[in-house]
Amino acid sequence: MNHKMTDLKGIDQDQVAKLKAAGVETTSEMMKVWHDPDQRAKLATTSGLSEEQFKRMVSLARMARMPGVGPKYAELLVTSGVIGRKSLSKHTPEGLVKHLAEVSASRKLTGPVPTLTEVGAWFAELKPLVGPPE
């Protein structure tokens, strides 16, 4: 799924403006830049974003692109340390729901916390990439 970077919560609008000025307006464009070291270096130079800011925005874009996550839950996941499919696979659906609720409460995030059914769907999408359990 492709989303506008402006739709992602947890990114300062000044940072979004810097990305746009550098030619990145969507999560797909952000991921293309991330996977090309030359473009990544150019974006870092032209945008003036710190490496930490850039990595957080890439993580938000990556998570928002997952089916069922979108901009609605990307910030909560990234703030909780889930920055991609690999880190998602380290959790169980039940454990992740509990962890997300705890992080949301402790950080006083205003967005919704996903249900077990929603999180379970993320893991169903994940299984073909991870393979059968050993």
Image (cartoon, helix red, strand yellow):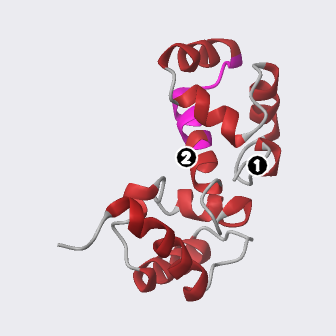
Q: SS at mark 2? A: helix
Q: Residue at x 68, y 68 (%)?
A: 109
Picture quadrant of residue 66:
bottom right
Q: Which residues are magenta?
A: 47-57
Quick one: label 1, few (<14), some, or many (20+) residues within 10 Å?
Answer: some
Q: Which mark is residue 59?
A: 2
**48 in magenta:** yes
Q: Residue at x 71, y 76 (%)?
A: 112
Give amino acid for label 1: His
Give the total number of marks visible in the rendering. 2
Quick one: label 2, few (<14), some, or many (20+) residues within 10 Å?
Answer: many
| Distance from Cα at disc 2 to Cα at disc 1 | 13 Å
Q: Which residue position is annotated with label 1?
A: 3
> On screen, 23 above or below 57?
above
Give amino acid for label 2: Ser
> On screen, 17 above or below 78?
above
**73 in magenta:** no
